Image (cartoon, rainbow, N blue to C red):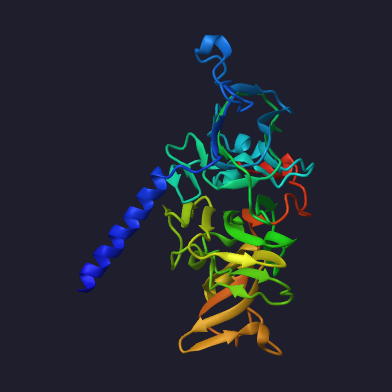
Amino acid sequence: MKNLFFLFAVLMSLTLSAQELYDLPKNEKTRWISFENISAKKGAGAKENKGAKGHPFERIPAGESVDLVNIEGSGIIKRIWLTHSDHLTPEMLRSLKIEMFWDGEEKPAVSVPLGDFFGIGLGKSVPFESALFSDPEARSFNCVIPMPFKDGARITVTNEADRRLDMIFFDVNLIMKEHKEKELLYFHAYWNRELKTELGKDFTILPKVEGKGRFLGTNIGIFTDKRYENTWWGEGEVKMYLDGDTDFPTLAGSGTEDYVGTAYGQGTYNHQYQGSLVADAEEGAYAFYRYHIPDPIYFYNDIKVTIQQMGGAPKAKVRALVNENGAELIPVTVDKAPNFVRLLEMKNPPKLNDEDFPDGWTNFYRSDDVSATAYFYLNKPSSDLPQLQPVEVRVKDIIKK
């Protein structure tokens, strides 16, 4: 009987999905925007060169911008596809800037390096597919995050490199429709990099944002400091401060690789909601993501998201990092079953080189080069978040590392 009930539930689910596919909504118009129909107007596509591939791409000189989307009206962007002639160069992926403006706002809701926006951490393109982004053969960029707007939408790409981008191709698919929702949630994205994180201070994935909305997730990139050698860097916990949280967050994880759905270290993999696209211990380069789709994170007043900068190694190795390499670190806990020592709660904790320092796996604050893109919805078309950091910060050492 249970098997029959399960089969019935599956069939009902498939039936409902099929009904959605052939259901014809009222007053919704499908539009594609590309250089072949930049206005998205009816009957205005493929006019150049008598319809024979007259305008498939544009060039972007150094220091200049091109509008991919600049339309009025109400609708929802459903999909963005894009590629360009320098898609494998880390410097170019960080030098190109994608920005999105909603409802005539002068400040962008999205202002992120192009590669990072599409889930490409550290400028290192690899084939992958997630629920929000994909790069089938490490040659293109796809995004399927729904992006609603009431009065208009504008998407630009700016070339902040010191050379011309010879070709950029794109295709934005959208539905034009009137929004009946009383309060629309607009899509936003924010990028941040710290070339050297502050010892003992959490890295900020998303600074405090006021309003109502939903945190969609993040992709994070790390270049480890060579002084820590190849010791484990990912003990840091992700923290989310919601709706008035101050000193302590409502949401806290148990470690970095735990947050992205793996355990005991981090290799390469890509799943729909979590993945690690780069895991190079020799180079000290890691790029990973987590998207909160099956596990929604809502906020009704404000949100802030951080990740601790913390690593771990056996006590003897930690001592060697300090004494032989000059690594900067602060021990925080020591674990050796059955004991778990919380050093920061001790009135007079022993120093790392003291004879009475506990023996065992030692977690410690550390400092690395960290960058992250945060994705979220907000009930406002713009926010008070800081501007995107200059290109010099975005590309510094990205090739050498």
Where residue 350 appears, as percent x and y from the top left, is: 66, 85
Q: Is 9 on the left-hand or right-hand side of 287? A: left
Q: Residue furthest front?
A: 26
Where residue 37 appears, as percent x and y from the top left, is: 59, 23
Q: Quadrant of residue 265?
A: bottom left
Q: Residue at x 20, y 74 (%)?
A: 1
Q: Nearer the viewer, residue 280 or 248?
A: 248
Q: Residue at x 55, y 72 (%)?
A: 253
Q: Is residue 158 visible?
A: yes
Give the total number of marks visible in the rendering.
0
Position of 291 relative to 107 (above/below): below
Q: Is 383 on the left-hand or right-hand side of 351? A: right
Q: Residue at x 63, y 83 (%)?
A: 343
Q: Is 383 on the left-hand or right-hand side of 298? A: right
Where residue 32 appears, as percent x and y from the top left, is: 55, 31
Q: Quadrant of residue 63?
A: top right
Q: Nearer the viewer, residue 141 or 350?
A: 141
Position of 77 relative to 40 (above/below): below
Q: Is 262 on the left-hand or right-hand side of 43? A: left
Position of 351 relative to 378 (above/below): below
Q: Look at the image and tell me in which quarter the C terminus lies.
A: top right
Where residue 341 appears, as percent x and y from the top left, is: 57, 86
Q: Is residue 309 visible?
A: no
Position of 278 relative to 263 (above/below): above
Q: Residue at x 62, y 34 (%)?
A: 92
